[in-house]
């Protein structure tokens, strides 16, 4: 190796290290990005409390009856009073949503990897997946109930898994495929095997696509489970609780159930955000936030 090649190698190593560290000098890094993130939540918090205040004020000003639209204070009151029952049924729904979310995610990622390995599978499956992704949840629930016992939680898990599968599969496959050809060619010039190209180039590139899909389906899984529960089954689930209370015109209780569903959805979404942060801290969006 010539002296110039040695210098180029040192330059490349320095460049890779600099890119990996975010091009931020050690002495100038922000010790903690927590205040910055909390500051970013202020507009959302203001908007949330503004909506609640307007809602509460409109109910009191126009004397809207609770069977039409209950006030937030009434909903929170019923939420506290019925917390034992409502969290019990919410927990059952959460189990259905989590089981379907995990199954749909595993299958979606597995099929996405399969589309990279076998081109005929990709060409045959992608158009079908795009068409199937448009099927409404309300059409899947009665079919799933007919395939399994209506009292079993399995039909609800199947509906959630189907709803989760297609966004995860499509996004992950796109991330694995949409890779810069120069990066792949560079890896091959270093005699990298297809497996090394997959894990060192394609998978890191696909992670942002994967987590973008997970942010959507984490919330959608709760919605899918509740909609599937509307079509029968156990009464100890959130969907049946909301449906029964609404049928009896006890709308504050129904809204309290909706509040539990919202809390569960936000919790799942927050878990996905945390996992994204732990799995890919090197991503440019996190580096920019930490450097701010």
Image: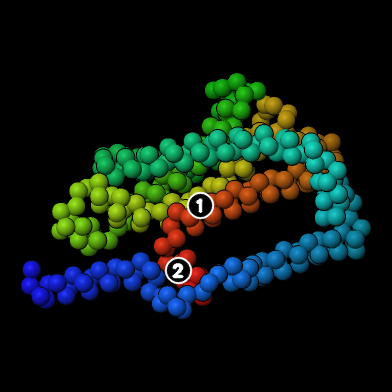
Q: Is residue 95 above or below residue 73?
A: above
> Does residue 219 appear in this view?
no
Q: Position of residue 22 (x, y in %)?
A: 39, 70
Q: Under tag 2, what secondary structure?
A: helix
Q: Under tag 1, what secondary structure?
A: helix
Q: Position of residue 205 (x, y in %)?
A: 35, 57
Spatial CA distance of label 1 from label 2 is 16 Å
Residue 118 left/right relative to 220:
left
Residue at the limit of the structure toward the left, as seen here: 2
Q: Is residue 155 above or below residue 27?
A: above
In the image, 166 versus 275, the foreground residue is: 275
Q: Which residue is mark 2?
A: 287
Q: Which residue is mark 1?
A: 275
Q: Position of residue 102 (x, y in %)?
A: 51, 38
Crowd class of label 2 (few under 14; some 14 to 19; many from 20; radius 10 Å): some
Residue 284 left/right relative to 93:
left
């Amino acid at each position: 190796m010539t002296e110039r090649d040695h210098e180029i190698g040192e330059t490349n190593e320095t460049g890779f290290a600099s890119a990996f560290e975010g091009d931020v000098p050690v002495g100038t890094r922000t010790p903690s990005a927590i205040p910055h993130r909390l500051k970013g939540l202020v507009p959302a918090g203001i908007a949330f409390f503004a909506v609640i205040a307007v809602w509460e004020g409109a109910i009191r000003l126009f004397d809207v009856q609770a069977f039409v639209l209950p006030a937030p204070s009434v909903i929170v009151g019923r939420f506290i009073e019925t917390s034992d029952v409502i969290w019990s049924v919410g927990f059952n729904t959460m189990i259905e949503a989590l089981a379907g979310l995990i199954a749909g995610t595993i299958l979606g990622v597995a099929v996405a990897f399969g589309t990279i390995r076998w081109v005929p599978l990709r060409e045959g499956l992608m158009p079908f997946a795009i068409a199937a992704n448009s099927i409404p949840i309300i059409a899947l629930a009665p079919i799933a109930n007919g395939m399994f016992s209506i009292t079993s939680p399995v039909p609800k898990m199947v509906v959630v898994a189907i709803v989760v599968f297609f966004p995860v599969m499509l996004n992950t496959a796109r991330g694995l495929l949409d890779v810069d050809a120069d990066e792949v060619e560079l890896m091959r010039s270093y005699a990298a095997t297809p497996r090394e190209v997959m894990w060192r180039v394609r998978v890191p590139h696909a992670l942002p696509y994967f987590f973008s899909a997970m942010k959507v389906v984490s919330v959608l899984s709760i919605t899918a489970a509740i909609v599937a529960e509307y079509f029968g089954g156990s009464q100890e689930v959130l969907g049946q609780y909301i449906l029964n209370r609404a049928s009896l015109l006890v709308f504050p209780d129904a809204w309290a159930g909706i509040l539990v569903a919202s809390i569960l959805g936000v919790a799942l979404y927050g878990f996905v955000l945390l996992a994204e942060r732990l799995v890919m801290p090197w991503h440019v969006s996190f580096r920019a936030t930490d450097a701010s």
